[in-house]
Amino acid sequence: LGFPVTAFLTIEIRQGSGHDAVATHLAGIPEVLEAYTITGAGDMWARVVARSNSDLQRVIDQVLAEPGIERSTTVIALAT
């Protein structure tokens, strides 16, 4: 998309909600480029992009609008 901010979200899914509803929700957000179910801390990782750090907050808010998501943590990429 050519956006200058890249971030990685670790997503925790509410128990009993399942990954499918969350994956469908994330697929509808254009700034979510990739998503993976994972083992370890968290349930999913998502790579997202944004126009700025403040725009990143908008993207995170969109991600968290899914009722099956309990919480997320975000790290911002500094360099490739």
Image (cartoon, grey):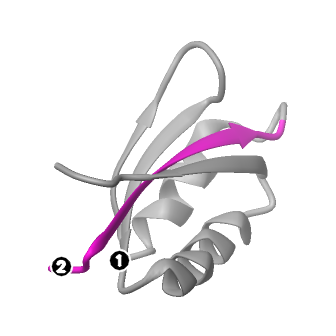
Outermost front residue? 78
Q: Position of residue 43 (x, y in %)?
A: 62, 30
Q: Relative to 8, does residue 44 appear above or below in the rendering?
A: above
- Quadrant in which the N terminus is drawn: bottom left
The residue at 65%/28% (across/down) is 42
Q: Position of residue 27 (x, y in %)?
A: 41, 64
- What's the mark number on residue 1? 2
Position of residue 6 in the picture relative to residue 57 (left or right): left
Q: Residues within 10 Å of mark 2 (few under 14, many from 20)?
A: few
Q: Which residue occupies the foreground of this view, 50 or 29?
A: 50
Q: Nearer the viewer, mark 2 or mark 1?
A: 2
Q: Residues within 10 Å of mark 1 (few under 14, many from 20)?
A: few
Q: Position of residue 11 (x, y in %)?
A: 63, 43
Per the image, label 1 sits on a secondary structure element best described as loop
Amino acid type at image mark 2: Leu
Amino acid type at image mark 1: Pro
- What's the mark number on residue 6? none
Is residue 4 shown in magenta? yes
Q: Relative to 46, does residue 51 appear above or below in the rendering?
A: below
Position of residue 70 in the picture relative to residue 43 (left or right): right
Position of residue 35 in the picture relative to residue 2 (left or right): right
Q: Is the stretch drawn in magenta largely helix, strand or loop?
A: strand
Q: Magenta span covers which residues?
A: 1-14
Circles 2 and 1 in contact, beta carbons < 8 Å: yes
Q: Relative to 4, does residue 51 appear above or below in the rendering?
A: below
The residue at 36%/86% (across/down) is 51
The residue at 39%/62% (across/down) is 48
Is residue 79 shown in magenta? no
- What's the mark number on residue 30? 1
The residue at 61%/69% (across/down) is 60
Q: Position of residue 20 (x, y in %)?
A: 56, 44
